[in-house]
Image (cartoon, coloured by chain):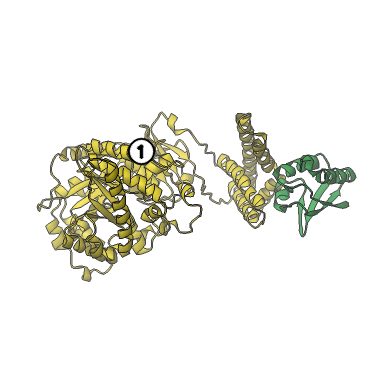
Chain colours: A yellow, B green
Amino acid sequence: MKVFEGEGISNGIAIGKALIILDEDLVIIEKTLTEKEVEQSYQRFQGAINKAKEEILELKQQVRGKITEEHAFIFDTHILLIEDRSLHQETLEFMQKHSCNADWAFNQVLVRLLREFDTLEDPYFIERAKDLEDVGKRVLRILLQEKEVTIEKVEEDIIVIGHEFGPSNITKFDNPFIKGFATDIGGQTTHTAIIAKALKIPAVLGMHNITLQVNAGEIIILDSVNGKVVVNPDEKTLALYRKKAKDYQREHQIFMRELAEPTTSVDGTSLSLQANIELPLETKTANEFGAEGIGLYRTEFLFLNLAPELPSEDDHYRIYCSIAKELKGKPLTIRTLDLGGEKYFHKTLIHKLETNPVMGLRGVRLCLYRKDIFKAQLRGLLRASQEYPSIRIMFPLITSLKELETVLEFYNETKSELAEETPGFSANPDVGIMIEVPSAAMIADYLAKKVDFFSIGTNDLMQYLLAIDRGNDEVTYLYDPFHPGFIRLLEQVVVAANQEGIDLSCCGEIASSPLFVCLLVNLGLRNLSMNPASIPNINHFIRSMDFNKIRDSIPSMSDLPTAEELREAYVSAVKKNMNKKDYDHFFGERG
Amino acid sequence: MIEQKVEIVNQKGLHARAAAKLINVTHTFESDIMIQKGVNEVNGKSILGLLMLAAQMGTVLTIRADGPDESDALSSVCQLISNRFEESA
């Protein structure tokens, strides 16, 4: 039995067999071997070489007649590469010299060769590195004894383990036998986290090299409440977790019934809980989980699903109408395209690789750069809002007043065009912006005069403010919403919104975390938007809290100048004001 | 050991397909065959080596053969290269 710790996502406990899905970025560990083991490892390597060769021959057979001879030739090159004795010899020498495992040695040799290719001048020859990389990975995959299984065919309870899963995987995982995820890469905002939330199954992320620690078929317990993964549990542990899973399920049912009650705390503070969604199909989940509306519909998937085709005005219109209809009059806030960094899609829009895409051509910048895309989306939005006045439009990544004015001008032009073309057109939806860049937060008072609402996107806001890559699990420990600088910034936004009397909500991940809910309520936020699965939890949490008592137990911020002290103050305030059962549920067992 | 210089005359140079043809020839000989471009010398039986030579049209290569069938080996290799690897251009 082995226990690993990571970051729990989408609360719950799941038990199943490990299914390892390899990502391109293999993590390979060096092992020190005896002379005899080196020999055995090299034999395995040779076996993998032969297997890889068979695979390539089979592939060649499959495509025969479907592609030109010119292209089929690539398989011959791959076979020659795999058979190249110098590759085998160098791997063996490396293994003997370092007394190490074949996968490690082979990977080191590959890396050296790939670097060498990179120094060539002729682009044709530089490109051949891809062929080498391709066959190299094939061999490594076989060596690591992990074959890609077609996940759609799984018919027993499984836990999917991998490096990190991309957004295109989401439909593949929509299978009732998939009980949870465990990944190497961490972060609340990774695609795996989003997929887990969308599918309402637990996940534990950020475990560095879980893919190498687990063998396919081993029994895995995922405890996302405590951020734990147990591999090969003993009977006792397994029985304990089976009971925990049952208890969790029971509590969840109680919380679900509580959704019929208003989200009002013991001290009488009323909150509105809405849902963040990625896919139209999540609207159903949002309704089930008692969302008072959709606080953030991210339209990126709409684009990603169709890529490289772009969605048409009618595609936009149809999808927005269908979601609004399903919400039966509850508000629907639709954020315009906020793509950036997703290279495979980006390529079709701009033909330049960005070195820092998070700060590059994304959000409204991309929309203003490609006005054709922006216009189609705005027209679709406006037409949908003509039929469903519950629709609100939100612009992402605003950084300055001038930029906002440019966006609004284009929006108004588009609206006028539609009004001219369409008799009886009178749509006038609420228009708002994301506050997710520090500069926007600092000039929130100027921006508030131009829009109907603000929604604070805490994920990006913190990333930009604290200079932390939220996908880099080596630094995520610094990603702390209790940072006093972050809190000051939020205060400014709250003041600006209140002064202008505009609607204010928070749609960042922190809205689904009980501790931060206390912080946000204290700051004056009353509208929170989160992943749908968190709503029952947060609803129960709010209904059990006395926020006055919490506020009274927190000393003033100037006495707690560090994130650590502030967090500690909130934790102890919550602990003091909550029964043990609830506390254990929300914060995991006290160690 | 014998050696001979030969110029790459096909348009695409010693690209993957040409290198594959060359490998097919070198592997029929027992002799060691080395191919040199400038300061780089690679094993004529290794596709990796050949590709990493990145030899374009106009490059002059030095071919060395050493072994019982070195003379046949050398002439076969030079002939293939001079014949543009049997490509049309």
Picture coordinates of residue A179 (x, y %)? 36, 36
What amino acid does circle 1 point to?
Asp
Q: Is residue B85 left or right of residue A160?
A: right
Chain letter for mark 1: A
Residue sitting farthest toward the bottom: A558
Observer able to see residue A240? no
Q: Is residue A567 above or below residue A15?
A: below
Picture coordinates of residue A188 (x, y %)? 35, 50
Mark 1 residue element: helix
Question: In this orientation, which residue lies closer to the viewer: A108 or A394?
Answer: A394
Q: Is residue B42 above or below residue A401?
A: above
Residue occupied by mark 1: A315
Question: In this orientation, which residue lies closer to the viewer: A503 or A75?
Answer: A503
Q: Is residue B57 left or right of residue A591?
A: right
Question: Residue visible at 49% across and 45% down?
Answer: A212
Observer able to see residue A111? yes
Q: Image quadrant for the N terminus of chain A?
A: top left
Q: Is residue A253 above or below residue A463?
A: above
Picture coordinates of residue A439 (x, y %)? 32, 65
Question: Residue visible at 36% across and 45% down?
Answer: A376
Q: Is residue A524 left or right of residue A28?
A: left
Picture coordinates of residue B4 (x, y %)? 87, 52
Q: Is residue A328 above or below residue A540?
A: above
Question: Residue visible at 48% across and 52% down?
Answer: A350
For label 1, count other residues whose C-alpha is less than 10 Å away and answer few (under 14), some (14-19) or many (20+): some
Question: In this orientation, which residue lies closer to the viewer: A483 or A418?
Answer: A418
Q: Number of marks in the image? A: 1
